[in-house]
Image (cartoon, rainbow, N blue to C red):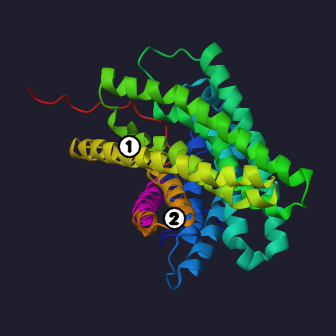
Amino acid sequence: MAIFPRNRTGTPVSHSLAPRLPSLRHLGPNWYATVMGTAIVATAGAALPVDVPGLRAGCVVVWALSAVLLAVVATARAGHWIMHRDQARAHLLDPAVAPFHGCMSMALLAVGAGTLVVGRDVLGRPAAVAVDALLFTAGTVAGLAAAVAIPFLMVVRHRLAPGSASPVWLLPLVAPMVSAAVGPLLVPELAPGQGREALLLACYAMFGLSLLATLVVLPLIFARLVHEGPLPLALTPTLFLVLGPLGQSTTAVNQLADVAPGAVPAPYASAFGAFAVLYGVPVMGFALLWLALSAAMVVRALRRGMGFTMTWWGFTFPVGTCVTGAAGLARHTGLDAFGWLAVALYVLLLTAWAVAGVRTLGGLFGGTLPAAPRPLRQAPAPAA
């Protein structure tokens, strides 16, 4: 059987006219963002404090899609390391690409959480727990490794110019926060006793690890914006990445408060519940401030010609963490305002996911993704 199609004369069509699979050489770790952004649509939808007909079924479908995406991207990344090892090593030594290695951990954790939250409708609870436990373990180990290895490389191997801080620096640091947010789902699955308490406090330790590391990096990012001006157009969507540790930490404290009564003694369990509100409300307020600032910068960049790049997936997962954070605050405060905030943010998440997904498919079928990176274009300076 012929491999290539033939024309009416029986002559094989030129290789250049036949469909080709995209090259794996420039397939970076940032492609895991497609998995993260898809999985969070399912888990955030299930967390909404409203009953929408068909929403649960839609979340199951999106979770299944995220699981398929995880398998595809993980296979492609393995092929990248096997066939293009030189480029894979170059990615680790590239300060613009290396932080994205934290995305693999978050992709594993997001799909694992989705499996237990909505995938159990298809797999059954025992199988869903087993899958989530496997993905949680793998994602947590990968996330802790990235949280140490990437900053180490930034110190000893990367040569970073002053004022070059970027929101992507947060990616390896927020991975343990994702573990802290989804780990509580597994706490009730353990027998009462040392196991439950150890997992709960381990999640709390990862919450602190990620939070304090974020507090170190975030001032550098804002100082870079103030002193150096706006980010290059293609990187402007990465401003939304700051929402990740904010929304995810709010989600974490609320999830930990939900399972604390069965894992730690009563005085501490009550403190977990109080801290969820005392921490979550002001952090959600700052998240909304940063969302407004980032949205204004994105509008500015669009007016100056910002085109689609894979950084547009930064509009998805971070916003999704704010949805789950607001939904958690709605549970613990009883305020409808937080419930409607979660719904509004979920609409924004769905819109961003749909746009990023359609544009990514267009880039894949058009042959522009994945492609060699192009020089970043700065926004034109405003007229005097």
How far apart are labels 2 and 1 at the CA level?
A: 21 Å
Q: Residue furthest front?
A: 267
In-front residue for pair 27/343: 343
Label drawn at residue 238: none
The image quarter containing residue 375 is top left
The image quarter containing residue 64 is bottom right
Residue at 64% across, 55% down: 273
Q: Dot 1, how many residues are within 10 Å of its Cα: few (below 14), some (14-19), or many (20+)? A: some
Q: Is residue 157 visible?
A: no
Q: Quadrant of the C terminus?
A: top left
- The residue that mark 2 highlights is 330
The question of residue 361 being in magenta is answered with yes
- The residue that mark 1 highlights is 290
Amino acid type assigned to the residue bearing label 2 in the image: Ala
Amino acid type assigned to the residue bearing label 1 in the image: Trp
Residue at 48% across, 55% down: 316
Residue at 45% across, 65% down: 346
Can you give x and y, in whole percent of width and height, for residue 266 in the image?
Answer: 77, 55
Residue at 70% across, 48% down: 179
The question of residue 171 being in magenta is answered with no
